[in-house]
Amino acid sequence: MDMLINFFQQSGFALLADNWGNVIMIVIGCVFIYLAIAKEYEPLLLLPIGFGAVVGNIPYIESMALGVYDDGSVLRYLYMGVTQGIYPPLIFLGIGAMTDFSTMLSNPKLVLLGAAAQMGIFLTLIGALFIGFTPGEAGAIGIIGGADGPTAIFLSAKLAPNLLGPIAIAAYSYMALVPVIQPPIMKLLTNKKERLIRMKPPRQVSKREKILFPIGTFLICAMLAPGALTLLGMLCFGNLLKESGVTERLANTARNALIDSVTIILGFCVGASTQAQTFLTPKSLFIFFLGAVSFAVATASGLIFAKVMNLFLKDKINPLLGAAGVSAVPDSARVVQHVGQKEDPNNFLLMHAMAPNVAGVIGSAIAAGILWSVLVPG
Amino acid sequence: MDMLINFFQQSGFALLADNWGNVIMIVIGCVFIYLAIAKEYEPLLLLPIGFGAVVGNIPYIESMALGVYDDGSVLRYLYMGVTQGIYPPLIFLGIGAMTDFSTMLSNPKLVLLGAAAQMGIFLTLIGALFIGFTPGEAGAIGIIGGADGPTAIFLSAKLAPNLLGPIAIAAYSYMALVPVIQPPIMKLLTNKKERLIRMKPPRQVSKREKILFPIGTFLICAMLAPGALTLLGMLCFGNLLKESGVTERLANTARNALIDSVTIILGFCVGASTQAQTFLTPKSLFIFFLGAVSFAVATASGLIFAKVMNLFLKDKINPLLGAAGVSAVPDSARVVQHVGQKEDPNNFLLMHAMAPNVAGVIGSAIAAGILWSVLVPG
Amino acid sequence: MDMLINFFQQSGFALLADNWGNVIMIVIGCVFIYLAIAKEYEPLLLLPIGFGAVVGNIPYIESMALGVYDDGSVLRYLYMGVTQGIYPPLIFLGIGAMTDFSTMLSNPKLVLLGAAAQMGIFLTLIGALFIGFTPGEAGAIGIIGGADGPTAIFLSAKLAPNLLGPIAIAAYSYMALVPVIQPPIMKLLTNKKERLIRMKPPRQVSKREKILFPIGTFLICAMLAPGALTLLGMLCFGNLLKESGVTERLANTARNALIDSVTIILGFCVGASTQAQTFLTPKSLFIFFLGAVSFAVATASGLIFAKVMNLFLKDKINPLLGAAGVSAVPDSARVVQHVGQKEDPNNFLLMHAMAPNVAGVIGSAIAAGILWSVLVPG
Amino acid sequence: MDFSFQNVTNADGIGIAITGMAIVFSGLVLISLYIASMPKLLNRMEKEVAKKQARKAAKKAKVAAAAAPAKPVTELTDEMMAAIAFVIRAEKEYEDAEDHQRITVQHDDASTVWAVTGRLRNLSTRM
Amino acid sequence: MDFSFQNVTNADGIGIAITGMAIVFSGLVLISLYIASMPKLLNRMEKEVAKKQARKAAKKAKVAAAAAPAKPVTELTDEMMAAIAFVIRAEKEYEDAEDHQRITVQHDDASTVWAVTGRLRNLSTRM
Amino acid sequence: MDFSFQNVTNADGIGIAITGMAIVFSGLVLISLYIASMPKLLNRMEKEVAKKQARKAAKKAKVAAAAAPAKPVTELTDEMMAAIAFVIRAEKEYEDAEDHQRITVQHDDASTVWAVTGRLRNLSTRM
Ligand code: NA
Ligand code: NA
Ligand code: NA
């Protein structure tokens, strides 16, 4: 009977009484699951993260190795793919194998919008330094503005492993909330006439261009910022598998079984890393605040840069496309489409928005490479 | 020429002469393969285990690192997923993603049958203690009665890594032999009238219930027995991926490529861990004996509890369903169906039997969590 | 501004100026990619290796852990599957699950051709010793003549990890170049009359034979050369999964998602291991030279042995089939078909050539097992 | 291996067994109750949601009625009724269709959208 | 890198090569023999199994004949023959079908059975 | 957490930000130029290749003409022209088909060839 009482004293029900933080995190996890299912905000990410947060916040006695931070636990082994930065490149491999870069190839000017939106990263870095984060931490926080989960995880693992949880959660949350964050900024910074601009239909792209694109792009980026080598190497490798036409079965596995397996485990582990004890700190609040600023600045930079480009271009760009430069693929491109169609239901911007959208992925990977090489400790 | 002779002296043919144990184990492996192919007893498990046993019992000179117990060998690396308990949760993820819990949701009373059948675990624990096993070993042996391979492996890895091989083999063997073990007990403990009882058709279950089920179930179980967190977390996570409707591609990978890959490697490694030198011991014999007892007790407990429930219920339960509470999914549910149809060919018990069947999986995972927290060394 | 200059001094563009070796290797990588896409020479291998070589030769400053040889880098973790020999058995598992051995079963004489072609391995071993390689290195170099990438990687990882890169590249390059290397030798060593020989259509093989084949073959080989246990164990296991008829879903995953994932990562890592700093050495040149000799000797041995067999056989063998004994599955079998059809467009040798072809795989795995046990250090 | 009941008492085997079964039963009883109560709770919730919506709709209708011109009802000819019914039905179908499509797109989320844009582009140049 | 045949003899290169080729050939010769003998062994086995079954069947037939009433044969009218033939054929078809289904279920074993029960249930409630 | 602009200057935050944006822009501008120049380069390359082939073809034609008998042209009747046209077209189609097939086979490379041989064999024995 003592044993039974003792057991109940060690059970989660009893332990939760002392750990309201865990209760809060479990509720947040459930909210994530709700948003994923009911609102369909990035469900492939939010659902695993949400359920992971529920699992990671069940309290247990210390002598059992159960959580992602306990040596020898199963979750620890699976989490190693996060802390060692192994999962993000594998996800980029799959993304490369599923992305069709033709719209970008047919309109190279739009690539620049993907560069402008990276402004969010560097301004946030300055903000984070100002608040008092160390340079490494500030770099990792800045990358939230890259709006790219795998890139954020990869860089945090290198520069600020202690903040990996909040940074990853912030990055994925805001990516999921892009349909909420971006439209007001887009309406504020553009007028109706601009939003009505139609883009020319893109030209046909040859198979050769598609094959040469990943090779050249990789060489340019890796030479310029070797730190981006792993992420962009995998992205371009995956794309080459897809476009070569001779390795279709490999591309198929990369964009299905492989990326799905990694996505499941990555999301779950990131969620499970939000144990209230390490997660509910003032630092996390600052990170979420800076992340929101970062997304807003990135969106604004893209929009404004598009308007600046229009000063010099004969064929005007619809400045809404600038907002797609933040990446958050493919959600921000969809947002551009929706906002554009509100003014003119026959204006199809989606395919044009994919160009700055994927350019933004490359842009933030380069930024991550730069931050890594500049801020890496030792 | 010396070298040739020397080589043949080191070859398996020569070494086998001194290792009759290996010959026996190779024959047992072949019997497993035969049962898998000719009798179709759980072929997805028995065939990999059988071939693994053949591979693991080829004798070789000590200086070569070949077996699962040799540092640096390939099999050792693959076997780490077993010893560290990584494969079982991944299998549970896949099982969750392929299981439809609706029959259980539509008849919650049947869940209790899955609890009763866990009696086998705890009685066997007492039996194993009596025979002289240490508490940890006794707990791991008891879990054989859970009739759930992954759970047995997971707990043995924690409580009695030295007995992992025999326990895993015993668990999987008896699971495969469920169609042989259960029917006589079922006929002994029920009369014809009971076996003829028909169940009401289950009600329709809404999508919302299916979505809420894994979340609530996980919270209840993990709070009560945090040790079950990893296994049940993955089971419920997989089920949520399936039922949410928004992560179908992840569920699909979890229940196909992922679970299959793990099943192949897990089965093969468990088989290869049966090297005669560590496997053919009196302890293993006791484990097999206790395992058989455990299955019998579990079956009987389920049946008897169903009869006890009938004393209080207006809508009588067919007591055969109690036998499905041992899990061994889905074989014991099929056995219930067959035994029931022998009395009345128009009595379809299969779908009803799935309810205690999957409840038994949850029940033994809880039991494993309890045993782990009570018996974990240190 | 200093930082910008400093950054450019650390960028790949600046570093390449001091590292012409890397430039050469990047060009070679591009040539591999070209051969894979334009000439379709083993694209599933050459494309990943080629792109890996490009990625592996981007120069970077030492303080960043990026390459396969840097502790803690992502590529290092992925490369561990190569250095620990984990990927090759998994590839053999998939190959087993996709190979139909019926032509071999229906014409057991042709198996001997697969033995004869292994002469290349052992003559090259002698050659490598003569040139001054250590015994371990010489064994690993010899196995290039086995024309089997996974076997070569597996053995090099054990006997000469320092030469793994060049050996793997040599093995895969020559396998891809089989359509260029073999035809002249085949024409030189056979006359028109021999090339016109037609083979009898093979007999029907029963399901039982197909099931018993992998089990018996594994036992024979593993008893004789336990070192081949891992590779042949997986090959035969995969084949049993395929032929048993009861584990189709496992076989399906083994020959698709699993082998594809491993192929992608293996090829990429092997490519990335060709960093000019470790790759462009005189040793590598010798290895490539010996590899070419090895392929030529293996082809010739197969052809000559077939002619010798014809002296004793009533039903003459088309000696071209001997060339398929080198393995390089399935390219050398295709080469046999093409060369045969040049003389007689209605002579279909492909299916007959598959018999020595797969026998060659087994033969070189046995040879690898022997070399490992004879030459393993310590 | 020494057979003895002392071993069992030393390890408190009986206690563990009883505790274990008690907790296993607690767990599955709780799950059973949870499952049994779910449909009721969901039902009640749905009703309340429905009530709220009804109230809102009623309010709106009132406001609309107030804002509407004095004799609107009599002017609703059969043709107008048919037209309204048609619009409502079409709208409903559209919503359903959109919903359906949204789910479909979601399923292989990234892949389709990313790949589709390329295909769209191809189509656009061919047209 | 010093070219010299001494290296070869030091490492017993020739010995390794000869041993190696000998074992490779042994291995593949054994496999070849194994393959060649399989059809014969399987054939012989099948014959013996067939014989045993034939003997058993004969015994059974005898017993049945002994147990049967004296003049059963004459009473087998055409209609009865037809009926028996039909039953046998139906039974045969049923068996084949069952067999076929068993294999199908086996292939994606767990998945179907687990998922099917849910679907069965749905059907049952709709009927 | 002490808010201060000193932190930014200590870490040279402004410098990093400027450097960073400069390099990100350099990278994407280079990619943009690379993409923009690709079609032109590929076009030029193709033209040169085409020229070379044309020259070669011309040479061959000359040689062929020299080697051909004196009055071949007049003998090319309409029927012959049609026949040649047909052959060329058929050949072209064959090539295309072959090309297509080659790619198909390539796609699941190993699997088909390895598996097909077995199936071929089965067919051969049945015929
Ligand atoms: Na970005
Ligand atoms: Na159970
Ligand atoms: Na070979």
Image (spheres, coloured by chain):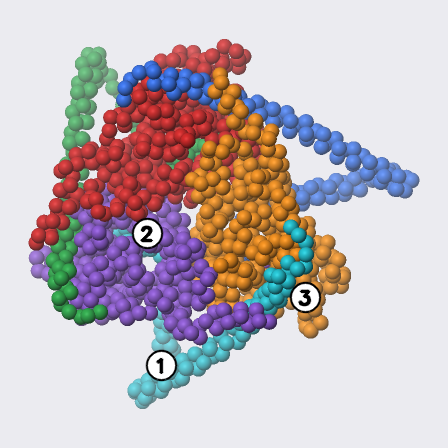
Chain colours: A red, B purple, C orange, D green, E cyan, F blue
Q: Which residue is drawn at 71% across and 57% down?
A: C186
Residue A356, image x, y percentages: 46, 24
**Co-location on one chain, circles 1 and 3:** no
* Any part of residue D88 in sight: yes
* Residue F4 placement (x, y as % from top left): 31, 16
Judged left or right of residue B19, residue C371 is: right
Q: Name the residue under label 3.
A: C305
Q: In which quarter of the image is the N terminus of chain D?
A: bottom left
Task: Answer above or below: position of B156 versus B13.
Answer: above
The residue labelled by disc 1 is E76
Q: What is the spatial separation of the Cα atoms under label 3 and label 2, in whole angstroms? A: 50 Å
Residue tagged 2: B84
Against A211, residue B119 (above or below) is below
Marks 3 and 2 on same chain = no
Residue F34 x %, y % = 58, 25
Q: Residue B131 occupies which quadrant of the picture?
A: bottom left
Chain of the residue displaying label 1: E
The amino acid at mark 3 is: Phe
